[in-house]
Amino acid sequence: MAWRSSGINNNEMIDNLKRFGVISSGVVENGFRAVDRRHFVPAGNEELAHTDQPLKEGNIHISAPHIYGAALEALELKQNSTLSFLNIGSGTGYLSAIVAKILGPKSLNFGIEIHQDVIDHCHSSLKAWSSSHGPTNAARSHPRIIRGNGLCISASVGESILGFDRIYIGAAIQRSNLLHISKLLSPGGILVGPVDDNLVKVIRNEEGKRDASLTTARRDNSSAESGNESDEEEGISDGFAVQVLSRVRFASLLRLPTFDTIIPAQAWSPEEHQYFPDAFQKASSEIMMCANSDYVQPLPPQPKPEERVNVSAVLPKSLWVEVLSFTHRRCK
């Protein structure tokens, strides 16, 4: 059983998470082993760091390890990838640090947290974790924590325009909020989080059609009795599939204070070039090399009436640097 997954240290806790079937993949196991929970628990709770239970001091709260294990397995993370990750209600940063370790330096990792004291604790915890295992590329993908309201994230500005590949919600939302947050997913993206008293998994389909092969989240008894709620009123819409993973009990995601929350898009620069996806690096490097070539190019070997021209040479290299700083990392 999940609550039996405590240990005397981080490795024993993870061994028990595996033993009781909470963790099944090597990717998630390695992520857990690389991030000691002791660095992230509320101050004064270090002796309880490896117990399989939630811990809370004031606004600072960390969920039980078995909850994070189940969520990480459901998120289907890809090791050393370019996936973008959003943690709504990021709290101590423990889950985000595990995700950072799994996804690697070419990923994007954002957290939204409403309490400034929790953000301060998160930054301190991430620093302690980094110091404990020395400088690595995982530090490059440390989450960028933004103070904001997770229910007020703008979908039309910044990184949200193209959406996120993976989203975790760290506090319970109502079914009526599910559709809005799910729309922050990229096509093919996965969201995991507590909706009312269920831990659910939402997949945004590539084709925009519902996948009937997945179990759809069901109305509760009162809704079933009314029999007149639409899927969209449940928080479900065409283009999304919803699967109930388990029953859970989470504190609610705070509604107040309400203010627009914008997640800034990652800007390209020569210094950040190495952390962009390989396809973007290849395309931008070709533009830069061609920018130094002549505008008029030799005719191709096969006979053609028109000249072969180098469009990249229309602009000087310095201007291409500016142009690329406005392009999204998914451009190829």
Image (spheres, rainbow, N blue to C red):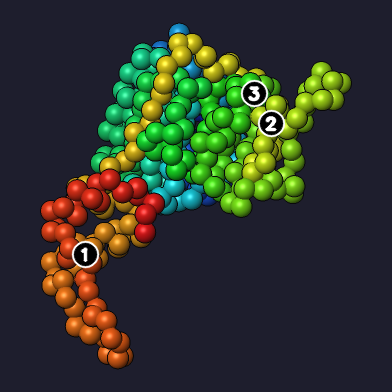
Q: Secondary structure at mark 2?
A: helix
Looking at the image, is mark 3 or mark 2 earlier in the sequence?
3
In this rendering, does residue 126 appear at all? yes
Looking at the image, is mark 1 or mark 2 earlier in the sequence?
2
Q: Which residue corresponds to the image point at 31% horizontal and 23% vertical from the top-left?
A: 124
Location of residue 157 (image quadrant)? top left
Label at residue 43: none
Label at residue 176: 3
Looking at the image, is mark 1 or mark 3 earlier in the sequence?
3
In the rendered image, which quarter contains the N terminus?
top right
Location of residue 132 (image quadrant)? top left
Q: Which residue corresponds to the image point at 28% horizontal and 86% vertical from the top-left?
A: 305
In three-dimensional space, the C-alpha distance between marks 1 and 2, rounded to whole angstroms, equals 47 Å
- The single residue placed furthest to the front in the displayed view is 305
In the rendered image, which quarter contains the C terminus?
bottom left
Residue with the mark numbered 1:
312
Name the kind of residue labelled 3 in the image: Ser
Location of residue 191 (image quadrant)? top right
Name the kind of residue labelled 1 in the image: Ser
Query: In this orientation, which residue lies closer to the viewer: 6 or 131?
Result: 131
Instruction: Determine whether label 1 and label 3 are within 8 Å by CB.
Output: no
Q: Is residue 236 placed above or below 106 in the rendered structure?
A: above
Q: Residues within 10 Å of mark 2 (few under 14, many from 20)?
A: few
Residue with the mark numbered 2:
232
Name the kind of residue labelled 2 in the image: Glu
Q: Residues within 10 Å of mark 1 (few under 14, many from 20)?
A: some
In three-dimensional space, the C-alpha distance between marks 1 and 3, rounded to whole angstroms, equals 49 Å
Residue 219 place in picture, x, y as percent: 77, 27
